[in-house]
Image: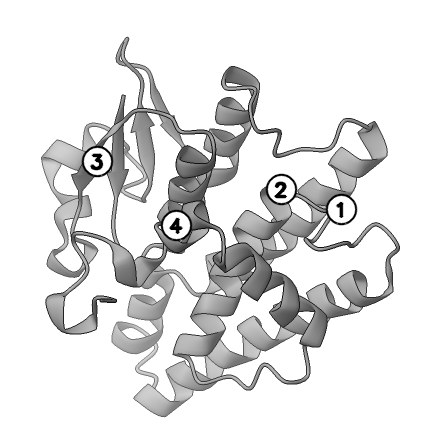
Amino acid sequence: MKFYSFWRSLASFRVRIALNLKNVPHDVVFVDIDKSEHRGNDYADINPQMALPALVLDDGTVLTQSLAILEYLEETFSVPKLLPEDTVGRARVRALAAMVAGDMHPLIVPRVQQYLTEELKLAPEQKTAWLRHWAGESLRALEARLARERETGRFAHGDSPTFADICMVGLVTFATAQGIDLAPYPTTLRIFKTAMALPAFAAAHPLAQPDTPAAMRKT
């Protein structure tokens, strides 16, 4: 299978983690959003939405949207489990994942940032305030749940990583890049550090990718 990715894409980050955790063989095709390669015909033919990531299966089937790809990987590659066995647990994990991937992330993607600056003419500091606001809202809501709910363990749900952790680490990574103080979110920060200590998470980090600009790449 082929995985179309961009180093800075938080949605690609999610799928990279799942592919690593499940040890799924795949080839990576890098699509440079900064050079508008996602808007070229080659990629638009794969995903008309011109958003990353995309996963092309060996039979040519194209999967898009990170959460849908996670569901496919969970149903196709059984080990390790990234969703709990019980229905209520699965609902909780999916809800935590959607709080990030469904509610916050759409507000900070590159096409939204471009609209804010090019169409609405927001100054750089105004755009930064927008990004920090929505990341902060998500962090506050996530912390409130993780800190009080008994299902929280070493990870967001129990003692092994799930979809919730896969989405949450992207939020914290983005918040860090935006200079947001994480001290008010101790439970979220603890779980983030636990997850990022796993090789599958660390290897998927945006700053550890082959297409990461050399000056920014982790050594």
Provide the residue designation for mark 3. 28
The disc at residue 158 is 1
Question: Real-space Cα distance between discs 1 and 4?
Answer: 22 Å
Q: Decide: marks 1, 2 in contact (CB < 8 A)?
A: yes
Question: Real-space Cα distance between discs 3 and 2?
Answer: 23 Å
Q: Amino acid at mark 2?
A: Thr
Question: Real-space Cα distance between discs 2 and 4?
Answer: 14 Å
For residue 206, above or below residue 51: below
Could you say whether the residue bearing mark 4 is in a helix, strand or loop? helix
Q: In the displayed image of the protein, which residue is found farthest to the top?
A: 59
Could you say whether the residue bearing mark 2 is in a helix, strand or loop? loop
> Circle 1: is it few (<14), some (14-19), or many (20+) Cα within 10 Å?
some
For residue 154, above or below residue 180: above
Q: Is residue 101 visible?
A: no
Please state the horizontal and vertical placement of residue 146, each as a whole percent of the image. Answer: 76, 61
Provide the residue designation for mark 4. 13
Query: Which quadrant would the C terminus be assigned to in this image?
Result: bottom left
The residue under the point 32% across, 15% down is 61
Question: Real-space Cα distance between discs 1 and 3?
Answer: 31 Å
Could you say whether the residue bearing mark 1 is in a helix, strand or loop? loop
The disc at residue 162 is 2
Could you say whether the residue bearing mark 3 is in a helix, strand or loop? strand
Q: Nearer the viewer, mark 2 or mark 4?
A: 2
Label located before the other in sequence (1 or 3): 3
The residue under the point 74% across, 34% down is 90
